[in-house]
Amino acid sequence: MFLKIISLSLATIFLTNPSVAETFEVQMLNKGETGAMVFEPSFLKVAVGDTVTFVPSSKGHNAVTIKGMFPENSEKFKSKIGKPFSVILTDEGLYGIKCAPHYAIGMVALIQVGTAINLDEVLTVKHKGKATARFEALFEKVS
């Protein structure tokens, strides 16, 4: 019982204290270790309250949520092309991200925040071009 109370207390501290939240950086690249026109890393598993910063390491990229691929209660986002962008992820679930100019050639990423509670909905979204195959590989990483 004592350990359960400590665990719940620690969980409350981590979820309500922004000083313990982590920041993750995602590079937006013309050419990366995993290919051309990529987010690196292209898959992240983070906790509720963590921040993800998208860094345009190459010109001409942005980060945009894909319709139908983010938790129901969360806000969609769209960064400006060529500008760094940070978002605090406050809702549990999967977030599908695209670079608007390079979506059809497969520049996509998937972020899992906590549990993938919206997996069924996210899997029904249709994609353009190479984005389909890249998402198939990313879905294999969801746990």
Image (tube, rainbow, N blue to C red):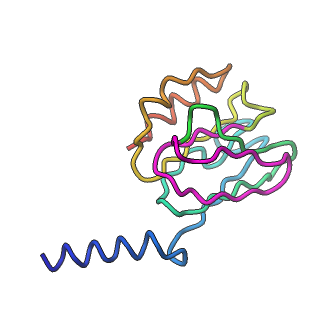
Does the magenta segment cover residue 90? yes
Q: Is residue 66 left or right of residue 90?
A: right
Q: In which quarter of the image is residue 42?
A: top right
- Residue at 18 percent across and 77 percent down: it is 3
Magenta span: helix, strand or loop, mainly? Answer: loop
33 over 133 or under it: above or below: below
116 over 6 or under it: above or below: above
User: How many callouts does the rendering have?
Assistant: 0
Percent coordinates x, y for residue 121 in the rendering = 47, 29
Q: Nearer the viewer, residue 65 or 82?
A: 65
Q: Which of 92 and 45 is in front in this view?
A: 92
- Residue at 51 percent across and 28 percent down: it is 136
Q: Quadrant of the C terminus?
A: top left
- Residue at 55 percent across and 40 percent down: it is 70
Extreme residue in the left direction: 1
Percent coordinates x, y for residue 111 in the rendering = 54, 46
Percent coordinates x, y for residue 87 in the rendering = 66, 57
Percent coordinates x, y for residue 58 in the rendering = 83, 48
Q: In which quarter of the image is the N terminus?
A: bottom left
Query: Bounds of the magenta span?
Result: 71-98
- Residue at 74 percent across and 38 percent down: it is 99
Extreme residue in the front direction: 73
Q: In this view, does 90 lie to the left or right of 57?
A: left
